Amino acid sequence: MTKRKSLKTRAKGETAPAAEPALASARLHALLDGATVAAESDPRLFVESLEKGLRILSLFDSSRPALTVSEIGRASGLGRSAAQRFVYTLERLGYLRKRPRSHEYALTTRVLDFASAYLGTDPIVSKSAELLADLNERSGEVVALVELDDTDIVIVSRLASRHPFSLSVVPGMRFPAYCTSGGRAILAHMAPEEAASVLARSDRKAFTSRTLTDPEALMAELALVRRQGHATVEGETVSDALSVAVPIFDSTSRPVAAVYVYCPLSRWSRKTVKQNLLPELLRTGEEFSRAIGGAHARMSV
């Protein structure tokens, strides 16, 4: 395993990187563009009132933990009168609660029921505890299981680093697929036209000076990832870290998820990742695929 700095040295020289807010936290709003979805949907089947209620719930995140009815009306585009009716209904159903002093509304724990139901029924997540725990124990770093949702990857399961200074991620966080190792590990094993479509729809902004944003360069990178069987991203989302990921395949050989390890450059390099971590990560990917009835072709390290 790679040599580590002492706790004293890390505490003096490092700060704890957090998931970049523009990268992770407020992306759901863009995904739930209700007007666009409604326009593209069959009006005989699409329930606009349901979409509007979900649109309101999606407004709340770490940057907007509580909102007044007026703020909800403006942010949702529904207007105050319509927003008031939806907010009242959501409050009565137990998904929103009103703060008496500020007259703001916030989410309740009832929204966690949906997340809990998903985690309890996803066949990959159900296999993740033991496999992630073993990888986490061997690496000492953040390990996570991610799935693709349109142009994003979503953290569905993760174990924290044993070190006091590391990336802070929690299940439910979203990251752009094009510039993350987990996203590239999945995209690289999709049909090229599917991957190209995801890249075309992505908001390919540069988070650091090293972020790849050009579609042709990204497709070339995905071809490399496909050949080597794993994706390594260094300094493209967080400047002082790299992450490495491998895909997970279902019984039809389709990539359905990826497992990744986050490696701060203060503790790791590409060389030490390849020597000490990648073989274990590849084995974990194989075990995940086998656990859900899929096959995983071993690539050379």
Image: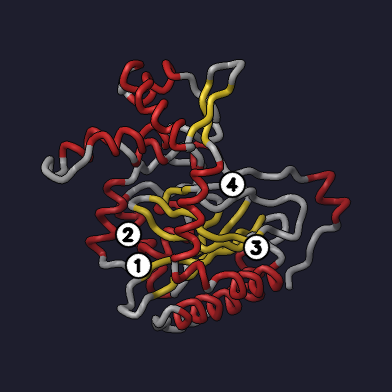
Q: CA distance from mark 3 to mark 4?
A: 13 Å
State the residue at coordinates (11%, 43%).
44
Whichever of callouts 2 and 4 sits on the residue coming sooner in the sequence is 2
| C-alpha distance separating marks 1 and 4 | 24 Å
Q: Amino acid at mark 1?
A: Ala
Q: Which residue is mark 1?
A: 223
Image quadrant holding the N terminus, namely: bottom right
- Residue at left offset 61%, top offset 53%: 241
Side (left or right) of 204 relative to 14: left
Residue type, label 2: Met
Residue in the image at 37% along x and 76% along y: 250
**Judging from the image, what secondary structure is the residue with disc 2 in?**
helix
How far apart marks 3 and 2 lie (CA) works out to 25 Å
Residues at discs 3 and 1 in contact (Cβ within 8 Å): no
Residue 209 visible somewhere in the drawing:
no
Amino acid under disc 4: Ser
Q: Is residue 108 above or below residue 163?
A: above
